[in-house]
Amino acid sequence: MLICCFQFWQNRPVNAQNVADALQKFNLKKAAIQKALDNLADGGRISFKEYGKQKIYLARQDQFQIPNTEELNQMKEQNAELQKQLEDQKKATSEVEAEIKSLQSNLTLEQIFEREVNLRLEVQEMEEKLTKLRGGVTLVKPEERKAVENMLSEMIGQWRKRKRMFKDLWDTLTENSPKDPKEFKEELGIEYDEDVGVSLQSYNDLIQQGKKRPRGK
């Protein structure tokens, strides 16, 4: 394990603490690492130098084969070729993944048939509703329509009542007030129906039109 540590330490000097930090995931004690380093040094596997009480360990340089210029050039060429092969492999992998994703997004024949059946049923249902509407048949039950009309009439009645109550109160407040009614209204943040784009009369007209419209049978 320690030999591997030195082989991958970028060939630089280390002390026992450096090795302990590198091998901390193995839960090794510093004392055990120090002993192992001393054994390696005694066996001639590594060398060391003492600086006071601290020992600095070095990989023996005679164990490394230093390539010449020709060998370095060959290694560079091999590295470039491997890099090219890696890029080609990445590109091929990406193309395969894209094709797989495309195939997964397509519907199967069974799913296509199932979707066609559902769409035909939806079209048939909409055609039946359209036929009823063309024939003047109402799709809302009379009692449901009546309940909605009554509720709307009640709401409009409350609206008219509250509108009248506000007008009476507002006229009383502004009758003898020195302030301009418009400025007073803006100061209080009051908005009329017209200010927000609604009209009580338009809803009254809607009720009347509904009463005049012929009912389906």
Image: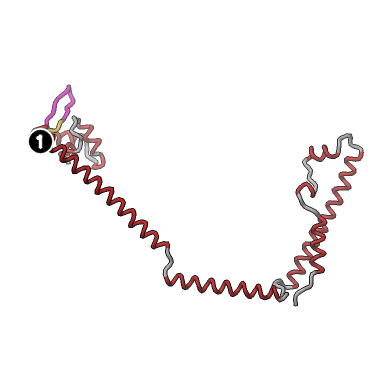
The foreground one among 123 and 28 is 123
Please tell me which residue is depicted at 11% across the width and 36% down the height of the picture: 65
Left-right relation of 53 to 183:
left
Please tell me which residue is depicted at 85% across the width and 54% down the height of the picture: 161
Left-right relation of 61 to 103:
left
Q: Position of residue 61 (x, y in %)?
A: 11, 32
Please tell me which residue is depicted at 92% across the width and 38% down the height of the picture: 176
The foreground one among 89 and 39 is 89
Q: Position of residue 14 (x, y in %)?
A: 20, 31
Q: Is residue 180 depicted above or below 56 in this figure?
A: below
Range of residues picked out in magenta: 44-57
Give the amino acid type for the residue marked by disc 1 in the picture.
Answer: Gln
Badge 1 density bin: few <14, some 14–19, many ≥20, Cα 10 Å: few
- Whether 47 is among the magenta residues is yes
- Whether 81 is among the magenta residues is no
The foreground one among 29 and 123 is 123
Q: Quadrant of residue 21?
A: top left
Q: Secondary structure at mark 1?
A: helix
**Please, what is the dominant secondary structure of the magenta stretch?**
strand
Q: Residue furthest bottom?
A: 217
Judge whether residue 39 can be spotted in this image.
no
Q: Position of residue 132 (x, y in %)?
A: 68, 75
Judge whether residue 121 can be spotted in this image.
yes
> Quarter holding the C terminus?
bottom right
Q: Quadrant of residue 68?
A: top left
Q: Is residue 88 depicted above or below 25 in this figure?
A: below
The residue where tag 1 is placed is 63
Q: Residue furthest right?
A: 176
